[in-house]
Amino acid sequence: MLTIGRIDYANVTPLFHSLQEHFPSADYRFIGGVPANLNAQLAAEKIDVCPSSSIEYAVHPERYLILPELSISSAGPVASVLLFSRVPIEELDGQDILLSAESATSVNLLRILMGKRFGHSCRYTVSSSPLDEALRTAPAMLLIGDAALRSSMAGTGLRIYDLGLLWYEWTGLPFVFALWFCTRSAAKTHYQEVRLLAERLVQAKAYADREREHIAEVSPEAAWMGREGLITYWRENISYEMGEAQKEGLRLFYRYAAELGLIPAAPELHFFH
Ligand SMILES: C=C(O[C@@H]1C=C(C(=O)O)C=C[C@H]1O)C(=O)O
């Protein structure tokens, strides 16, 4: 039996849909959650395999192996990692910025963009308040996942900065928000099962690409994003690729994070084979 974490966001619905439709298995137990929560369960080995925040790998590289050919990334706008601001981003120097409690990677990406790209020094506080309430106490807030998608659709009248786009304009590289990792202990005790799952996920990625339209029809997110909205998001924003460009983007993110003291050191990328 493998315990698999599942991010409860629209960004990964096509992959899980394809996995469960094409490779239904009584040997898989799924645990849903937001990334911050899944990271903690992975670190505690309550989950064997999980798509989770790319920064979590850099925090505990000795605990994980990365499954090859998979990511949740974007080469340009990601549409679901957004800074909502009452003022232009250039005016946020010295200000308080609120951070989604669900994220681990994007909050660090924001610190890197603010510090290194814009030369800003801001104060950051984690907040679980709804956006309209939160922005009564601070000029800007970072949201990720479905909360970001929903708020951007709600027409808040706020300025919206897409972190995937800010990174891409600045570096010319994709940004890897999430990696699929397995714990090193699961790789030892359940080697064959993890290997089979890793192969199935790469196949599921191809199915997800081919069957996007059908998946959008049967996905619960269509109720609030619309079928066309979902298809566009999956086709134009979210990528599951992990090629050389994604690896380069990931290494650069780790290098900047280490330079700012957000992680102890930029880790080597160790893959499961
Ligand atoms: C692309 C996204 O990236 C997510 C952002 C994460 C983070 O900030 O830690 C973790 C997993 C990703 O699913 C999104 O939120 O839609």
Image (spheres, rainbow, N blue to C red):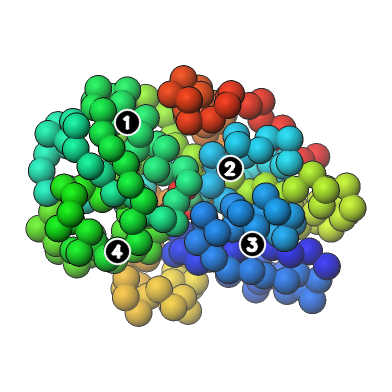
C-alpha separation, residue under disc 2 versus residue under disc 4: 24 Å
Secondary structure beneath dot 2 equals helix
Give the residue at the far top of this rendering: 259
Viewer-side label of 2, 4: 4
Compared across the picture, whether 28 is left or right of 118 comes to: right
In percent of width and height, residue 226 lies at 31, 73
Classify 207 as above or below 271.
Answer: below
Q: Are marks 2 and 4 in contact (CB under 8 Å)?
A: no
Check disc 3 and give the amino acid type: Gly
Q: Are marks 3 and 2 in contact (CB under 8 Å)?
A: no
In percent of width and height, residue 170 lies at 31, 26
- Which residue occupies 28% across, 31% down? 114
Q: Quadrant of residue 15?
A: bottom right
Q: Which mark is residue 113?
A: 1
- The residue beneath circle 3 is 5
Q: Which mark is residue 129?
A: 4
- The residue beneath circle 2 is 56
Q: Are marks 1 and 3 in contact (CB under 8 Å)?
A: no
Crowding near pointer 1: few (<14 within 10 Å), some, many (20+)? some
Viewer-side label of 4, 3: 4
Q: Nearer the viewer, residue 224 or 143?
A: 143
Viewer-side label of 1, 4: 4
